Image (spheres, grey):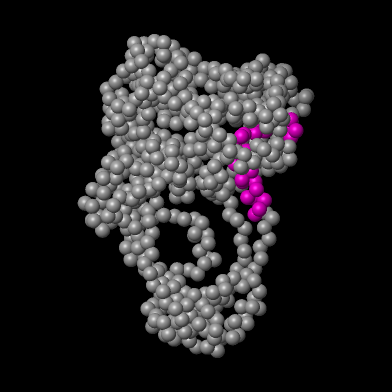
Amino acid sequence: MLIIVESPTKAKKIQSILKVKAMSTVGHFKDLPDASIGVDLTTYEPTFVYHDKKTHLPKELRAAAKGETVMLAGDPDREGYAISCHIYEEVKEVAKECLRMEIYEVTEKGLKESLDKAVPFEQTNTGLYNAFLGRRIGDRLVGYILSPIASKALRRGYSVGRVQSPAVRLVVDREREIRNFTSSPYWMLDIQLDKDGTTFLARHIKGKFIQQADAQKIIDAISAQTHALAEKVERKEVKQSPKPPFTTVDLQAAAAARLKFTPEHTMKLAQALFDHGVITYHRTDSVRMDEAFITEIRDYLGKSLGSSYLPAKPHQHKSKNSQAEAHEGIRPTHMHSVADIAAIIRKEGLTPDHAGLYEMIFKRAVASQMAVARYDSTVMIFDVSGERFKAAGRVLVFDGFLKVYAEVDEEKEKKGDEDNKLQLLPPVEVGELVPKIREVLEEKKTKPPGRFTLGSLVKELERLDIGRPSTYAAITKNITDRGYVKEEKGRVVPLQPGETLIDYLRDKHAWVIDYELTSKMENFLDLVVENKETWQRFCKGVHNKMGFSIPPVRASGVGPSELQLKYAGSLAQKNSLVIPEETLKNSKALSMWIEGVVGSKNLSPPSTTDVPKTTATAPVKKKPE
């Protein structure tokens, strides 16, 4: 038997557990070419080529697969299935048989279950591969047709993306909303009361006063009163339920808020945790958890914390997408104590960042099956000279799941100063007169909406149904790397190229940054997965939005022009840089090198008199002083 996966780490782990041959492709080994669009603009059929550094791989795959039962075990998503399809095309003629094996956890139990469920590759759902084709080719059409048009119009190397451009628009529009926001004052009126030494505030039920004079009239009317009459006292128990295990998006958002990790870094860490067999598959929008693992959690909690921390029945968390229920949320593969986390991470040779992310995943999964937290909530309404004031308080009676994992809700924290703050309230009965100490009138100002964090940006993309779990990290990385947005003090702000691009697209190609249309495209690809639509219709629809335009001729297939070489050479000489040999062979690569140097140094184009006669071919680096 031969098991073929994407990750070398995963291959080694599988080999050590199952004692069978395993090899890896290290991700995709075939893709559309760099030098040309690689798509027939009539049929939309792609031309895939081998990656330059993996031209040897097909031969190695065929040699290893000869006469073997081959388990095609690319990750259980569209990208992983596409890789398996490409492997299948290489080995089907020489292998004894080819089966599809979907691995959700790299453990003995998980691997054996995956082997038992493996099916002949010919019987698998080709809709997954077709959806991959639709996304890959549709994105290529946009990139190769709109990007050059935008770059020519704006006189700079711009990249337009079917999904990345709407993400840039979100950041740009939010920033402009903040810039255009005009702050206005308002006033909040409280009274300070005292009952047997416990001081607390009650807020006027009107809430905000737009005019200070209106609040002042009330102060004038009640200032002579020394007591407030308790008109209503309502006490009730409030319960807070735990959240389910992490989905991909929730994990990225929580890691950004708690650990200050970018979505890209979070997914790299999660990939390693998965490959090492520490967590279940990390690209998911499911919140379901394996019943056997729930039993393990309940056994552990009963022994370590007692039955009071266990709900009578296991919590049943429901996924937003009913189709996701076939999978699981992100959880540990083994139950253990929090104290064991450091040793587990050390044993696998992983880093403190891995440990931080794993601890968060572990605690959230365990907490999801714990008892609810309970509070005693009290609301009191007081009357002072016909004016009514409200005091609210809450006391934690039982911590429940909060003992393991306390939720952080940034939005609620931001609104905290707008609402009547939760406070410790003394016992008060209806009809009781409570001493009034003073009136408190506080001026505040309205605030603009907050900037996105990378985590909240991902959550907003999910809310708008733009992108899928496997794409969010790439989206945030691309728009950052291309210089359209940047992180500043933990918040995402647009850069001038990003604003310029969005203004151009809004004016000339508005469809590509339309949220609703982008969402419809995602849903169309879901229909392709279900074999209810075709990838060709998807690509034709995307091409139609661009008027069936043909991409301009790219010079990258024949190498850089003489003028481009001279320009780059002058730039290298002026800044004591040398240009990699491979870059000098490719027009696109050289353009990106030039743009990177000019962008980072804010340089002006060199004059023609500065052009050197030769160009260097060593790797890019600063020459020693």
493 relative to 291 in the view: left or right? right
Image vertical order of residue 434 relative to residue 417, above or below = below
Residue 327 pos. (x, y %): 38, 37
Identify the residue at horizontal 44%, vertical 26% (top origin): 125
385 relative to 293 in the view: left or right? right
Asked if the stretch drawn in magenta spans residue 154, the answer is: yes
Image vertical order of residue 462 relative to residue 30, above or below = below
Identify the residue at horizontal 67%, vertical 38% (top origin): 511
Residue 88 pos. (x, y %): 43, 17
Residue 538 pos. (x, y %): 59, 29
576 relative to 327 in the view: left or right? right
Kindly report the secondary structure that dominates the magenta region of the rendered protein: helix
User: Can residue 27 be seen in the rendering of this structure?
Assistant: no
Asked if the stretch drawn in magenta spans residue 345, the answer is: no
User: Can residue 196 be seen in the rendering of this structure?
Assistant: yes
- The image quadrant of residue 552 is top right
- What span is colored magenta in the figure? 151-178
Which quadrant is home to the N terminus? top left
Which quadrant is home to the C terminus? top right
